[in-house]
Image: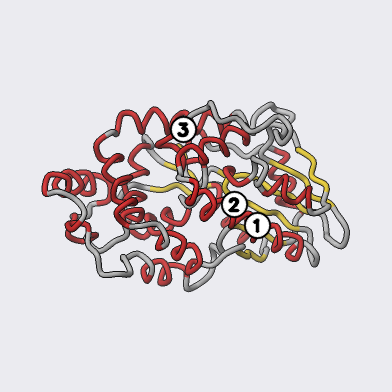
Amino acid sequence: MKILFKNSRIKLYLQVFYFFLLCGIAGCSGIKTSADASEENKLEDALLWKLTGPEIQEAYIFGTFHLLPEADFYLSKEVQEAFDQSEQVVMELDMDAPSLQMKMMQNMSMTDGSTLDQMLTKEEMELLDTQLQEAAGLSVAQVNSFKPFMVETLLLPTFIEGASASYEMSFVQRAIDQKKEILGLETIGFQAALFDKIPYTDQAEDLIELLKDRKQMEVLFRSMITLYQEEDINQLYSASVEYFSPDEVELLLHERNQNWIKNIPELAKEKPTFFAVGAGHLGGQEGIINLLKEAGYSLYPVLSESGKY
């Protein structure tokens, strides 16, 4: 089952914000394929991995693309079986937490009192107003205090023609249907704090780039989906590294991966577990697949018989 998004509901956009933390989309505005992972650490092209090791139950790790066109959404038989035989589901956030929406709202605004009109020119504010009205039915005045990255996520779904689909929301619904517990590797407060460490002026520059270069963004977004369909987790990682600054890579990718590889075995001790995280976290020397291997666990790619993810 998949959950479809319509480009008219602010409530859904609040959920989308937290889907964009580091899936492939986060790197779409700077994708380059020259920064390949080293051959030593290059992993097989696979989005689904089986995790085994001492003192843990059977577990699977699946790399998601947080929001994409409905036509590109696909769950292989292997992914469905891995999900169905697991007894709990762990994602980046506990997506069925009752307080989720409220906590999202609490973390939308800049913490230092800054506003967008202090960082953007009059012309840029007018351009933003036009695109926001089209994307979400919001005026720029309504989001003037929002973190620039938050505003950027409100615009990103407009790069998708027609209905959209989300792996995370699909897994949430599937877990609810099967009466499985949903857990999170992080909290909303932790994720929101990550972006507070990135200067708002830097975030504003990224927002302006998105506003002014939509055609390029559309092409790059499509390229990211292609990499995902090819299950090329090495290039998805490289694209993220190319887009972010070295400090941002450490903050948004590597440090989070280090935290996760401590939590993943602990969560898998009690029950067979299905983990679903942004595909950009899987590849690379400091991706969770290689880090878990270094920690003494065995990981095996689970390839789809159909040749699709």
Give how far across and how far down residue 174 sits, in percent. 61, 54
Give the tally of numbered discs: 3
Name which residue type carries label 2: His
Looking at the rendered structure, the secondary structure element under dot 3 is: loop
Q: Residues within 10 Å of mark 3 (few under 14, many from 20)?
A: many
Q: Which residue is mark 3?
A: 31
Say above or below: 91 vs 299: below
Q: Earlier in the sequence, mark 3 or mark 1?
A: 3
| Residue at left offset 64%, top offset 61% | 259
Structural distance between the alpha carbons of marks 1 and 2: 6 Å
- According to the picture, the residue beneath numbered tag 2 turns out to be 254
Query: In the image, what residue occupies the spot 17% across and 43% down?
Result: 127
- Farthest residue to the right: give it: 54
Q: Which of pointers 3 and 2 lies earlier in the amino acid sequence?
A: 3
Whether the residues at callouts 1 and 2 have beta carbons within 8 Å, the answer is yes
Label 1 residue SS = helix
Residue 298 percent across, percent down from the top left:
83, 47
At x 80%, y 67%, the residue is 270
Image quadrant holding the C terminus, namely top right
* Residue occupied by mark 1: 258
- Mark 1 packing: few (<14 Cα in 10 Å), some, or many (20+)? some
Residue contact between numbered discs 3 and 2, judged by CB atoms under 8 Å: no
Residue type marked 3: Ile
- Secondary-structure class at tag 2: helix
